[in-house]
Amino acid sequence: MQSPVDERRPQSFERVLSSMCTEPHPAARRAAERFLATNPGDPATYETIADLEREAVGALAEITGLADAEGAVESDVSSHGYVTTGGTESNVQAVRSARERADADDPVVVVPESAHFSFHKAASVLDVRLRTVPTDDDGRADADAVAAALDDDAALVVAVAGSTEYGRVDPIPAMADLAVDAGVPLHVDAAWGGFYLPFSGHDWDFGVDGVSTVTIDPHKVGRAAVPAGGLLARDRAALDALAVETPYLETTAQASLTGTRSGAGVASAVAALSALWPDGYREEYERADELAAWFADELRGRVDRVVDPELPLVAFDLAPGAFTALRELGWRLSRTGSGEARVVLMPHVTRESLAAFLDDLDEIR
């Protein structure tokens, strides 16, 4: 009997402009298929995938500056993180770690209003309070507002390095200074931006004193297969705070949230990182950055307002009728919370595809 799955095909990325995921690198696809049945949630049983996870974390440690960071307490940084299911799990775990280590009876997480919705999930699941601070006129966290929000209940400060709506990078050095002075950890959510930022000139990673944990997702710009996120910590104690005993497994404890995890995601992350770091990712950043600038310039003659891109993401005003018409033509678009259309310049997005989008926009205007 033919499976209904056999009659279907995965959606083409040809007209997908809103997603922060993309086609896996061919090497990542092959590696994922080879390790479909392995479970890094029990590394003593699945030793090969456990070794690959250490390789993945070691590579992510290099990308995020952890390998060279002052204050990393062990030379073996491959033990300072794990491959998660994605940014949501990583962010929930960062909040959970901070809650477990906090002295406050009613812990508060200070987040900018640009923070990903996963922090609202974390607050609900973990019974912590979010204290949301405003962003400035350019969509970055207001450092003065962060300072005003820090008190004895503060357990964590969150900074965004590549916001989901506008691709903005918060003033991380200033926020890190505030966190250090307040005696609380700073978590950087670089789930999407982390594979662009090493080449962009921003100060965002463990090279900034005070950055305690970082989220970075290989299954986004890193071009690993889904699911493959990453959580890294400067101090191993941040992961130890997450550990629970697992007496019926060969491994006696684990710090991950999901338990059973995808060996396919781990293997694909190693394959993509091996194939692309650093030169391939640098080339992709330069290509996407140039393409974002070109696309923004092309839009300025066609729409009322374009938000200047910082990382390769372009947001712009688009009338409801035009938005609907473009979606009916097959373009996968989404809007920011303020209503702008947003286009994410992922590796599958090309000048040719954007030129076709602009032609369709011209037709319906």
Image (tube, helix red, strand yellow):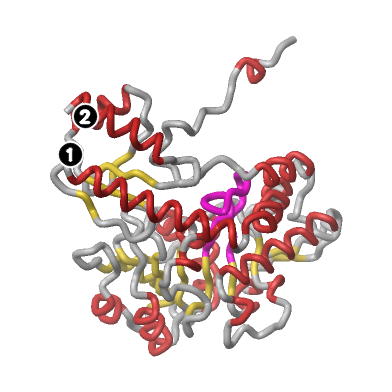
Q: Are marks 1 and 2 in contact (CB under 8 Å)?
A: yes
Which residue corresponds to mark 2?
A: 362
**In magenta segment, residue 224:** yes
At mark 2, the secondary structure is helix
The residues colored magenta run: 215-231
Earlier-in-chain disc, 1 versus 2: 1
Q: Position of residue 133 (x, y in %)?
A: 27, 68
Q: Residues within 10 Å of mark 2 (few under 14, many from 20)?
A: few
Residue located 69% across and 61% down the image: 56
Q: Secondary structure at mark 1?
A: loop
Per the image, the residue denoted by label 1 is 302
Q: What numbered label is drawn on residue 79?
A: none
Residue at position x 47%, y 57% in the image: 285
Question: Where does residue 351 sit, x and y in percent of width and height?
Answer: 39, 40
Disc 2 residue type (three-letter) = Asp
The answer to whether residue 339 shows anywhere in this view is: no
Instruction: Say which of 35 and 346 sits in front.
Output: 346
Residue in the picture at 75% in, 9% down: 1
- Whether the magenta-drawn stretch holds residue 115 is answered as no
Quarter in which the C terminus is drawn: top left
In the rendered image, the vertical position of residue 77 relative to residue 91, given as above or below: below
Q: Main secondary structure of the magenta part?
A: loop
